[in-house]
Image: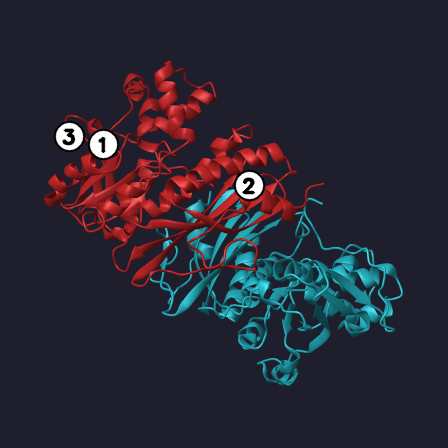
Chain colours: A cyan, B red
């Protein structure tokens, strides 16, 4: 039977030119560049909670790393290294090979090296710790929003939630819409280039993993103040427009998780710079102004007439 | 119902004076001291695989962090920061409070700050990433053993394996022996001070988590060469002496996991320095010379007459 050490050697050991020492010792050794801070974040994904048990392992491998990279994107940090802890019910080599393939595809795409980890037996769960570098005092922190800031989001919202609904047969989508939404759900593209470009332009930033209202709420908790959101401005895939009349279409937009777009705030004086940025990124990315940070506490969603809408949505919470 | 964010705030948010930014943003921000390398290691502990489901959560909290700190001790690194990803079947606050208490007791004892993590619903499992600092090029690596080196171990071996056997009613122990063995099993003391003191003295080092033969085998794999172990010299709790006639007493000594002592190699010229070290550590710790690194491949255990013993033991492997 294949051993734990064979599995690590076979599927999870790749060259790590930017580490002093990679997989295979008690610890990896890394050098953080002079003048840089280390940004570090940990996420755990559990089968049945974060992904469907029959999820394609290749897509799961991509997503497991991508959602962690997204946390660094939201800090304006350059992702560099990761560790992976993996509990598996059995040593299913075909599954592992596909998972590793997706994981390293994402790693290669974003310049991340896997420098350590742990493989053990247990109910399927995955924990990644991601490490990156950001120049000292330039990180995009949640506590840096100021009253008067514009609120922006990248890309479109609600696609991943719609994709999940389609997979679970709670929604029927046209084929092109389904493709878009499943891609958003299964192979999210963390906005690293945007995060790097926003250093010195944005004040606060967060990635949208729990839903717009919940994640914007985290910025408000840490920064103080409140926010007004213009519902009509929220960027949406065409599909959401069609189902917007329904309560759950609105729910996908405001509280759908798993989009991994960035929500950030910046002074109105930065509007031209941000518009230019949208076009100058390696892959053009829509950046949409969706509201303002205000001094008064609370988060209000305004309709096309500027009237507050009655909103029940909150973000996803694993124990609520 | 208590939310994920409340749980994190209540049980896992403590001051982090040595982090630029601790728990509560997309990522934590850390500064590695000039001239230092970052040492990083990840372990995952799964209920039923690594610990009994009814394990006292306070002891589990200690051990979860301690086994990770032990990896840094084996590198000669100073532990600094940790992240914790936690999957829980439900939000059992009494359990969490006790777990956090044990975790932070260990953290305080070893000067570690919890800077981030994730709390989610799922079968009970725990993943810690530990970070520490070690001066550039001074880490104790597995690949640094040389033919002619002495092989040393700290403390005693086999206690944790005996403790587990007693808990599982596979062995009966006298009360003082039971206390010693359960302490070894449940609240291991990672050998950080020893690891730091061995910089410049030891060549290779590893912590004994999978059993002496398996872990020494990892040094040989990475360093090349072989080893001879003098069975009679292996340091053992009095209890193991008593059961040594049995096959499984021997098994505990050679292949019992979970001891978290250090196994290291050093030139014979360092014997006096190592003997002095044993007494000068903050808490005196027996250091025992148990064998030699040799040029010929293979790992041989020699009896009191210098004859090779027939050994079947290997280390613990989750998929073997």
Q: Which chain is indicated by disc 1?
A: B
Cα distance, mark 1 to mark 2? 34 Å
Can marks 1 and 2 be said to lie on one chain?
A: yes
Check residue B286 in the rendering and tell me which mark sits there, or answer none.
Answer: 1
Give the image quarter of residue A277: bottom right
Q: Give the percent coordinates (x, y) of residue B186.
A: 43, 30
Judged by depth in the image, the label closer to the viewer, 3 or 1, is 1
Who comes first in sequence, dot 1 or dot 2? 2
Judged by depth in the image, the label closer to the viewer, 1 or 2, is 1
Give the image quarter of residue B161: top left
Per the image, the residue denoted by label 3 is B306
Can residue B296 be seen here? The reply is yes
* Up/down of B21 relative to B7, above or below: below
Kindly state the secondary structure of the residue where label 1 is placed: loop
Kindly state the secondary structure of the residue where label 2 is placed: strand
Q: Is residue B159 left or right of residue B266?
A: right
Cα distance, mark 3 to mark 2? 45 Å
Q: Nearer the viewer, residue A319 or A18?
A: A319
* Up/down of B218 relative to B31, above or below: above
Can residue B320 be seen here? The reply is no
Residue at the image position 29 percent from the left and 31 percent from the top? B311
Per the image, the residue denoted by label 2 is B125
Quadrant placement of the C terminus of chain A: top right
Count of numbered labels shown in the rendering: 3
């Amino acid at each position: 039977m294949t051993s734990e050490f064979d599995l690590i050697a076979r599927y999870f050991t790749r060259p790590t030119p930017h580490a002093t020492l990679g997989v295979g010792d008690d610890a990896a050794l890394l050098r953080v560049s002079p003048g840089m801070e280390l940004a570090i974040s940990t996420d755990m994904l559990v089968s049945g909670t974060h992904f469907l048990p029959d999820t394609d392992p290749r897509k799961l491998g991509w997503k497991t790393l991508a959602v962690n990279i997204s946390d660094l994107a939201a800090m304006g940090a350059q992702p560099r290294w990761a560790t992976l802890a993996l509990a598996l019910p059995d040593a299913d080599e075909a599954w592992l090979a596909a998972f590793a393939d997706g994981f390293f595809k994402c790693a290669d795409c974003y310049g991340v090296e896997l420098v350590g980890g742990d493989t053990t037996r247990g109910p399927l769960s995955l924990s990644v710790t991601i490490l990156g570098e950001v120049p000292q005092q330039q990180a995009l922190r949640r506590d840096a929003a100021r009253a008067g800031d514009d609120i922006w989001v990248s890309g479109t919202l609600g696609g991943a939630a719609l994709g999940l609904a389609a997979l679970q047969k709670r929604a029927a989508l046209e084929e092109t819409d389904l493709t878009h939404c499943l891609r958003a759900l299964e192979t999210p593209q963390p906005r690293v280039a945007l995060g790097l470009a926003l250093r010195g332009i944005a004040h606060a930033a967060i990635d949208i993993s729990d839903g717009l209202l919940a994640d914007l709420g985290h910025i408000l908790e840490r920064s103080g103040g409140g926010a007004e959101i213009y519902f009509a401005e929220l960027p949406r895939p065409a599909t959401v427009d069609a189902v917007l009349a329904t309560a759950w279409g609105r729910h996908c937009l405001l509280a759908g998780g798993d989009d991994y777009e960035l929500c950030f705030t910046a002074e109105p004086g930065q509007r031209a710079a941000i518009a230019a940025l949208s076009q100058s990124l390696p892959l053009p990315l829509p950046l949409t102004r969706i509201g303002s940070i205000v001094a008064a506490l609370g988060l209000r969603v305004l309709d096309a007439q500027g009237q507050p809408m009655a909103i029940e949505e909150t973000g996803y919470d694993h124990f609520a």
